[in-house]
């Protein structure tokens, strides 16, 4: 390999970036460059392996991101173009029509995936999340199960996420045990955080600084947050938001062993007569079919795309899809519960500045059987609709005037004075909530489209309503002049895509084992949101990345021992 | 999921009756519209698809949906109709819907005095909610999106609502965190 030309920031220049031949059998193909794939790429290449990352989206970088709220929120610039179909239940017809103005599954097609545009809320799961079946007993009609691992086993990897990916925060009152402090102090509090804290304390609850994967101070090669306000939904031009694009991908490429092959849309994982994965077939930017050979495959395409790829990889040996002897590939899809209440205050908050969230409260985390339903959650102080055009469309109360001088004056009064208390909670795993292949729609490559089948369990909706009542209380206690919200309703759009290739010790009841190795295919690993056994209380990204760090460490060790 | 989902669904709710949801934003049209709008702003070229009368009428409608307030500019002064022209040039379905709605609007709407125009708009919202919702959406977005997309001339829409596109800030950000910091000082 030629001598490296190192830029001022210590990264390889494009000219010396490694490029592998497709016919060359690399050690690992990683499918997906998002929260999990980015971690896998960095860890496996740093462990000495040759890695090709196949990412369907283009390779946008910090310098490509624009402060264009209309482009992001109304035009959906980074979302894919392909049809996704949705139906409430298997008895309904699935349609490709966007519902609520968005596709059924929402994530950017770009290197870094959804980690580029996420809100960056980084909550750890807690011990209870891993063992709720044991604690509560089974819930009939659901797939509630214990994880094959405990919080204690995952804790060192949560800490690795804190320090290697970059998380800013401070200890909170209900924190699970942690082996190291946060690497960076919390981001400065916003008016929404001050008011949330004031209201929560007045109600007797215990708010604390939000753990955010956004740098409050610089790190080598990355700037601190400059509070520009173009945060949630946008890529960060400062590399302050800890997407894998900012934190993991450059370090992977700097090893000289990792190739990020963007605009590569995976069609199938190929297997041989022995049932081992041999490589990955994909479409390049021009739509030409190509195949990269590899000794092992890591599938980290997210909780919708990973089961889709496994189902598309069916063969005579795997007639129900690759790695699907359990029949669970694509099942137990969970979106988390997502709710909130909006309020308007006397003075300007100016929430269009800085990050989304600076204060959270998780006093309602555990399931309390006395409530009469399963579920737990937390909430935060923020403001969702800071993009001016989107605020006009979505931010005002439902009874607001829609035109005229009153409409204009309400826009002018409310825009700087509004905040939200957003609620985040559990989804029960149901085998009727699924990702399957649509039998009619296809994308531009001819691949069957994703079909989403989703109906929240009644307990999921009760939890949202229960939390929203408390969110009202917080805003009123904080002095809101007025609050408004909608009752919890069945969801038709998923930002969190969880559960569809769940982990477990029993091959009849799970897709991958406790190390993310597919039960059916010894050199195939699946690690992303699909791995989660239960949904947690919202904010799954940190757990996805902890799982990826842990899986990568094991995979590298297994490779060293010749055990793949 | 609550109304807090940051999405275009709020458009359906905000523009009343849900009938506006009968048409969908054309993503590809939006992308092309924004690029071409930016280009038109730079080159000062004429309208792409709307005729002169259509421009006058839509501009007049926009001027009642987000009117000027005394000296403070509204949607007409902001040039929201330029955003509309570029958007509709790339979305044949929406253009047809707009033209059908304009055809049913009383002739000479643009020349009516404001209070008569307001009566017509009130009727429109009740009787033609799909057309009204589309024009209301295009007016709002055309007034408040980045000026590169054709409207919000000289950022007057942003000035209307108190948005500042400085893009780099330091705390304190708003009144309540400023006061809290003052309390701690």
Image (cartoon, rainbow, N blue to C red):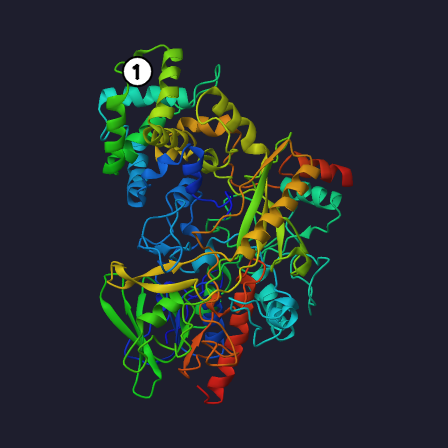
Quadrant that contains the C terminus of chain B: top right
How far across and how far down the image is residue A26, in percent?
Answer: 36, 79
> For this rendering, which residue is in front, B17 or B4?
B17
Residue found farthest to the top: B113
How far across and how far down the image is residue A153, in percent?
Answer: 62, 76
Q: Residue at x 29, y 45 (%)?
A: B28
Res B175 → quadrant: top right
Res A321 → quadrant: bottom left
Q: Is residue A269 left or right of residue A237?
A: left
Looking at the picture, does residue A351 appear above or below residue A162?
Answer: above
Q: Is residue A43 left or right of residue A305?
A: right
Q: Is residue B174 left or right of residue B1?
A: right
Looking at the picture, does residue A128 appear above or below residue A95?
Answer: below
Q: Residue at x 34, y 71 (%)?
A: A311
Q: Residue at x 48, y 15 (%)?
A: B71
Camera sees residue B171: no
Q: Residue at x 27, y 59 (%)?
A: A443
Looking at the picture, does residue B96 appear above or below residue A156?
Answer: above
Indicate the chain on which mark 1 is placed: B
Crowd tier of the residue under label 1, counting other residues whose Cα lies within 10 Å: few below 14, some 14–19, many 20 or above: some
How far across and how far down the image is residue A530, in percent?
Answer: 46, 67
Camera sees residue A53: yes
> For this rendering, which residue is in front, A392 or A348?
A392
> For this rendering, which residue is in front, A155 or A226?
A155
**Residue, disc 1:** B109
Total labels: the figure holds 1
Looking at the picture, does residue B4 appear above or below residue A12?
Answer: above
For label 1, the SS is: helix
How far across and how far down the image is residue A564, in percent?
Answer: 43, 86
């Amino acid at each position: 390999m030629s001598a490296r030309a190192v830029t001022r920031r210590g990264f390889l220049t494009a000219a010396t970036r490694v490029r592998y031949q497709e016919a060359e059998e690399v050690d690992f193909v990683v499918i997906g460059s998002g929260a999990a794939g980015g971690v896998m790429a960095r860890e496996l290449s740093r462990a000495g392996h040759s890695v090709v990352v196949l990412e369907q989206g283009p390779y946008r970088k910090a310098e490509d991101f624009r402060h264009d709220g209309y482009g992001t929120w109304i035009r959906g610039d980074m979302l894919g173009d392909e049809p996704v179909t949705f139906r409430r239940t298997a008895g309904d017809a699935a349609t490709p029509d966007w519902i609520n103005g968005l596709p059924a599954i929402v994530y950017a097609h770009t290197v870094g995936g959804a980690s580029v545009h996420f809100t960056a809320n980084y909550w750890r799961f807690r011990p209870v999340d891993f063992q709720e079946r044991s604690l509560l007993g089974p819930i009939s009609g659901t797939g509630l199960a214990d994880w094959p691992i405990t919080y204690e086993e995952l804790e060192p990897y949560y800490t690795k996420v804190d320090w290697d990916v970059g998380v800013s925060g401070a200890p909170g009152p209900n924190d699970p045990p942690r082996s190291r402090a946060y690497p960076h102090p919390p981001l400065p509090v916003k008016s929404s955080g001050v008011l949330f804290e004031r209201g929560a304390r007045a109600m007797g609850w215990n708010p604390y600084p939000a753990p955010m994967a956004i740098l409050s101070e610089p790190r080598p090669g990355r700037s601190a947050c400059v509070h520009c306000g173009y945060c949630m939904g946008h890529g960060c031009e400062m590399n302050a938001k800890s997407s894998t694009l900012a934190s993991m991908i450059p370090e992977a490429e700097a090893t000289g062993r990792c190739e990020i092959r963007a605009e590569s849309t995976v069609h199938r994982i190929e297997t041989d007569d022995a049932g081992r994965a041999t490589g990955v077939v994909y479409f390049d930017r021009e739509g030409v079919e190509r195949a990269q050979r590899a000794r092992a495959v890591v599938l980290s395409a997210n909780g919708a795309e990973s089961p889709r790829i496994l189902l598309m990889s069916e063969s005579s040996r795997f007639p129900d899809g690759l790695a699907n002897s359990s029949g669970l590939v694509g099942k137990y899809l969970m979106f988390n519960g997502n709710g909130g209440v909006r309020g308007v205050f006397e003075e300007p908050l100016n929430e269009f500045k800085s990050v989304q969230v600076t204060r959270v409260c998780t006093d309602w985390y555990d399931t309390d059987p006395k409530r009469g339903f399963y579920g737990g959650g937390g909430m935060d102080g923020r403001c969702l609709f800071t993009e001016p055009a989107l605020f006009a469309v979505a931010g005002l109360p439902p009874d607001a005037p829609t035109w005229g001088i009153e409409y204009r004056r309400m826009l002018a009064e409310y825009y700087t004075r509004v905040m939200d208390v957003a609620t985040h909670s559990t989804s029960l795993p149901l085998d009727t909530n699924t990702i399957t292949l649509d039998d009619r729609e296809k994308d531009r490559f001819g691949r069957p489209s994703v079909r989403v089948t989703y109906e929240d369990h009644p307990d999921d909706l009760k939890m949202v309503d229960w939390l929203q009542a408390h969110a009202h209380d917080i805003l009123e206690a904080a002095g809101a002049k007025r609050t408004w919200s909608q009752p919890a309703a069945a969801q038709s759009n998923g930002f969190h895509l969880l559960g569809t290739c769940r982990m477990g010790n029993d091959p009849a009841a799970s897709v991958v084992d406790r190390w993310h190795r597919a039960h059916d295919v010894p050199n195939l690993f699946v690690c992303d949101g699909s791995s989660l056994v239960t949904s947690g209380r919202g904010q799954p990204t940190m757990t996805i990345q902890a799982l990826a760090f842990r899986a990568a460490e094991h995979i590298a060790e297994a490779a060293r021992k010749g055990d793949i | 999921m609550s109304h807090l989902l940051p999405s275009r669904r709020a458009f359906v709710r905000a523009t009343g009756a849900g009938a506006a949801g009968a048409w969908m934003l054309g993503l590809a049209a939006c992308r092309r519209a924004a690029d071409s709008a930016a280009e038109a702003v730079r080159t000062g070229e004429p309208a792409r698809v709307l005729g002169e009368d259509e421009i006058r009428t839509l501009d007049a409608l926009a001027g009642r949906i987000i009117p000027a307030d005394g000296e403070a500019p509204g949607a007409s002064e902001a040039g929201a109709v330029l955003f509309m022209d570029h958007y509709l040039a790339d979305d044949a379905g929406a253009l047809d819907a707009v033209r059908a709605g304009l055809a049913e609007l009383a002739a000479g709407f643009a020349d009516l005095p404001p209070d008569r125009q307001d009566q017509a708009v009130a009727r429109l919202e009740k009787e033609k909610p799909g057309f009204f919702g589309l024009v209301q959406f295009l007016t709002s977005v055309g007034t408040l999106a980045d000026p590169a997309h054709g409207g919000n001339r000289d950022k007057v829409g942003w000035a209307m609502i108190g948005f500042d596109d400085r893009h780099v800030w330091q705390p304190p950000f708003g009144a309540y965190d400023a006061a809290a910091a003052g309390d701690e000082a």
